[in-house]
Image: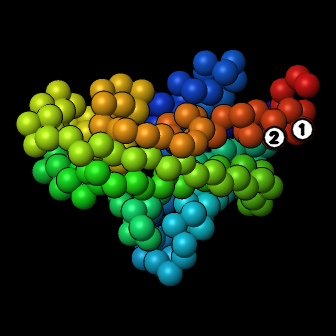
Amino acid sequence: MKLVLASTSRIRGDLLLKAGLAFDAVRPEVDETEIKKASRRLAPGDLALSLAAAKAVSVANRMSDALVLGADQILNLEGRVFDKPESPEAARRQLLDLRGRSHVLETALCCARGSAVIWRYLDQATLTMRSFTDGFLDDYLRHMGPEVTTSVGAYKLEGLGAQLFDKIEGDYFTILGLPLLPLLDFLRRQGALAA
């Protein structure tokens, strides 16, 4: 069974490769801004599922013989949804909003075959940022450079971003954007992996 990741996310691709999966990566043709506008009344987790499904179906419509995986992640701060920051200045504002508070990462996976979504999964992780100093934030942003705009939280937990936190509750893979263990279980049940 051909597996396709409807994403060009480096971290998601690395997770799949390190788990021993062979796959192709294809950029989905999805207007996330339009989906978010049309879905603004959805709960953050439902929005993440909607985006993941749209990505999976977008690619599956072009590759009907493949099992296509779509993923999305929404940062939920007390019902307020955050997008990836557009600039380092936006990342600074976002990190100041998150400083000293807990937020939830809502990570969704959907698998599609043809135009049908055949599996959906949503997981949550709660992360509590410490009350870091403005000096630490300046150093962090300087070290991260433009990379700070590539994740919804303006942090990379697998790197320097770990220093932003006091407490983390939830699955590490969920935080990275791909709940790997439930995905591997699904792929085994589909016969795409040895049981």
- In the figure, is residue 26 to the left or right of 86? right
- Image position, residue 120 (x, y; %): 73, 55
Q: Nearer the viewer, residue 48 or 76?
A: 76
Query: What residue is drawn where x is 76% and y is 33%?
Result: 184
170 or 57: which is nearer to us?
170
Q: Which residue is mark 2?
A: 186
Secondary structure of the residue carrying tag 1 is: helix
Residue at (24% x, 58% y) in the render:
97
- 108 on left or right of 83: right
> How many discs mark residues in the rendered view?
2
State the mark number for residue 189: 1
- The residue shown at (29%, 51%) is 100
Tag 2–tag 1 contact (CB < 8 Å): yes
Q: Position of residue 104 (x, y in %)?
A: 48, 55
Mark 2: give few (<14), some (14-19) or many (20+) Cα within 10 Å: some
Whole-percent x and y of residue 119? Answer: 77, 53
In x, y percent, where is residue 94? 24, 55
The residue sitting at 54% across, 48% down in the picture is 125
Instruction: Please state, as top left, top right, bottom left or bottom right, where the N terminus lies in the image.
Output: top right
Q: Amino acid at mark 2?
A: Phe
Choose top left, top right, bottom left or bottom right for residue 3.
top right
Query: On screen, 132 above or below 22?
Result: below
Which quadrant is the C terminus positioned in?
Answer: top right
SS for tag 2?
helix
How far is mark 2 from mark 1, CA to CA?
A: 5 Å
